[in-house]
Amino acid sequence: MYADRLPAYVQDQAGILSADEIASAYADMLAKYQKDTGNVEIAAEHVDVCLKLAAASCIDKLATYYANDDNSTISSDSVDHGTKADSFRRIANGYRSQYAAVVVNDNKSSAHGKAVQLPKRQRLR
């Protein structure tokens, strides 16, 4: 349903990822969402972070692709703050964190069928 919006989150300018890889990432995200929430359909408030979770899988593949690209020359007046692969990994980890913060924490806040921590009783004096 939302799979056509996924490529906007991936930003694959070089066309490295195939349509099958993107579709597979979306299917994996749906399976994880169903496992985490018990819902088959994505809730409207979770669409953005779910697409980011699927994009994280695609971005990991881009990071792997660029892992061998290394700057072999060292210049005295430049500083290398990381490679393209590192940048992709940071983006993917950020997307996963956003998913966990929104979907997993929302699901854990529901008390239905879960143990609830009761407040401690105060002592009488």
Image (spheres, grey):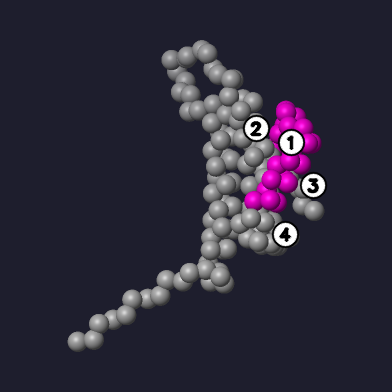
Q: Where does the magenta region start and end?
A: 11-32
Gap between marks 4 and 2 measured at Cα: 26 Å
Camera-near label (3 vs 2) is 2
- Proximity of marks 2 and 1: CB atoms separated by less than 8 Å: yes
The mark lying in front, picked from 4 and 3, is 4
Looking at the rendering, which quadrant does residue 104 occupy? bottom right
The residue most toward the left is 125
Mark with earlier residue (2, 1): 1
The residue where tag 1 is placed is: 21
Residue sitting at x 64%, y 40%: 57
Q: CA distance from mark 3 to mark 1?
A: 13 Å
The prevailing secondary structure element of the residues shown in magenta is: helix
Q: Secondary structure at mark 4?
A: loop
Residue placed under numbered mark 3 in the picture: 4
Q: Are marks 4 and 2 in contact (CB under 8 Å)?
A: no
Instruction: Kindly identify which residue carries mark 2.
Output: 61
Name the foreground residue: 8 vs 50.
50
Q: Which residue is mark 4?
A: 40
> Could you classify mark 2 by the number of other residues whose Cα lies within 10 Å: few (under 14), some (14-19), or many (20 or more)?
some
Q: Is residue 12 shown left or right of residue 97?
A: right
CA–CA distance in space, label 3 to label 2: 19 Å
Residue 22 in the magenta stretch? The answer is yes
- Report the amino acid beneath label 2: Lys
Badge 4 or badge 2: first in the primary sequence: 4
Question: Is 118 in front, or is 100?
Answer: 118
Give the quadrant of residue 122: bottom left
Residue type at mark 1?
A: Glu
Percent coordinates x, y for residue 76 in the rendering: 43, 15
